[in-house]
Image (spheres, grey):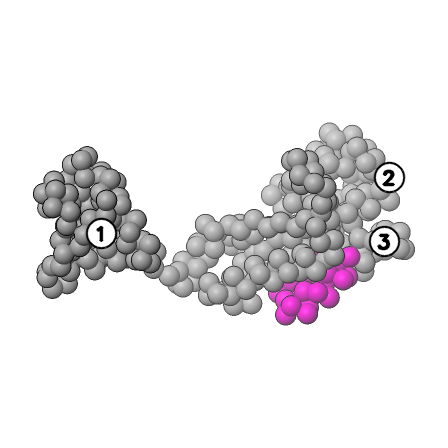
């Protein structure tokens, strides 16, 4: 619902903050941005009909992945003449907002939005790691305004995140008409970058308590007990299937759990179970909730 470019800048500031919290410095990533509305203005100046533009966007989004000659062929398949295709590809070589402005009308709203956006990024402290790049298009057709992507600074990995402004998407999926800004984060890519830099944190989470049970008859009492511990803010490794006591305690020991509870028929009958301290093997009683 927020129409100003402050929304895009805020989303990117949050994304950059997340990357920093995960251990990446400002020199480790780059944010590239452009504008679909700017490119649409440029295409209109190049006499590309509005109905041809979606196909042009799709073709241009592949630049860098396929040769420009192949892109030109796809542009001609979309109905452009050879001369139009050449002019479109040539326009994609501009390198600044000022150069882009020269290809639009003098009062371009898209150019002004990009200037305001760049100023917002500067205010957020992102001026050194963000820059204009007209090749950022985003292939999805619902983007209508500013679009952006984040990459590692070496360019060795796929995009870390990408997104942009969409004016009509909410209404198209049945909501009330409202503009919006979205961002998709590539958690797998982030993990690959952190691993390459040797800063990936341990993925091994250790539960406070392991809860297991002997037969199907003890499944519900064991589940209730696990839920009760979780309500006390303990992390619980809850068994999902019956298992033998030896196998359960071996698994609990390997996983590093501090305590382990194994429920059998006698425990359910008595309404109590034994909580074993895995470090010193001492045991305490615990009521089984009903």
Give the percent coordinates (x, y) of residue 114. Answer: 76, 58
Whether 123 is among the magenta residues is yes
State which mark lies toward you, 1 or 3: 1
Asked whether, in this view, residue 231 is left or right of residue 143, the answer is left
Q: CA distance from mark 1 to mark 3?
A: 63 Å
Give the percent coordinates (x, y) of residue 189. Answer: 48, 51
Residue drawn at x 26%, y 45% is: 224
Residue drawn at x 74%, y 57% is: 4
Q: CA distance from mark 3 to mark 2?
A: 17 Å
Residue that numbered label 1 is attached to: 210
Q: CA distance from mark 2 to mark 1?
A: 68 Å
Asked whether, in this view, residue 219 is left or right of residue 173, the answer is left
Give the percent coordinates (x, y) of residue 268. Answer: 15, 43
Residue that numbered label 3 is attached to: 108
Q: Secondary structure at mark 1?
A: strand
Magenta-drawn segment = 113-134
Q: Which residue is at the front of the view, 101 or 162?
A: 162
Q: Quadrant of residue 116?
A: bottom right
Which quarter of the rendered picture does the C terminus lie within? top left
Whether 173 is among the magenta residues is no
Give the percent coordinates (x, y) of residue 180. Answer: 68, 48
């Amino acid at each position: 619902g927020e129409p100003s470019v402050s929304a895009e800048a805020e989303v990117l500031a949050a994304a950059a903050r997340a990357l920093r919290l995960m251990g990446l410095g400002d020199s480790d990533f780059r944010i590239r941005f452009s504008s679909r509305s700017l490119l649409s203005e440029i295409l209109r100046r190049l006499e590309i009909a509005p109905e041809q533009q979606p196909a042009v966007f799709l073709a241009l989004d592949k630049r860098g992945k396929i040769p420009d000659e192949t892109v030109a062929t796809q542009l001609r398949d979309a109905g452009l003449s050879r001369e139009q295709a050449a002019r479109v590809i040539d326009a994609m070589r501009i390198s600044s907002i000022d150069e882009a402005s020269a290809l639009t009308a003098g009062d371009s709203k898209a150019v002004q939005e990009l200037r305001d956006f760049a100023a917002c990024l500067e205010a957020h402290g992102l001026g050194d790691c963000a820059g204009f790049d007209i090749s950022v298009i985003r292939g999805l057709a619902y983007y209508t305004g500013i679009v952006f992507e984040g990459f590692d600074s070496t360019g060795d990995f796929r995009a870390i995140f990408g997104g942009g402004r969409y004016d009509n998407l909410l209404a198209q999926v049945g909501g009330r008409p409202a503009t919006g800004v979205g961002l998709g984060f590539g958690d797998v890519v982030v993990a690959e970058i952190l691993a390459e830099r040797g800063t990936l944190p341990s993925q091994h989470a250790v539960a406070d308590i392991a809860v297991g049970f002997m037969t199907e008859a003890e499944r519900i009492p064991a589940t209730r007990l696990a839920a009760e511990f979780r309500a006390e803010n303990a992390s619980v490794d809850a068994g999902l299937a019956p298992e033998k006591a030896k196998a359960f305690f071996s698994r609990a020991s390997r996983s590093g759990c501090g305590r382990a509870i194994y429920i059998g028929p006698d425990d359910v009958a008595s309404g109590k179970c034994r909580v074993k301290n895995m470090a010193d093997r001492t045991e305490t009683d615990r009521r089984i909730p009903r």
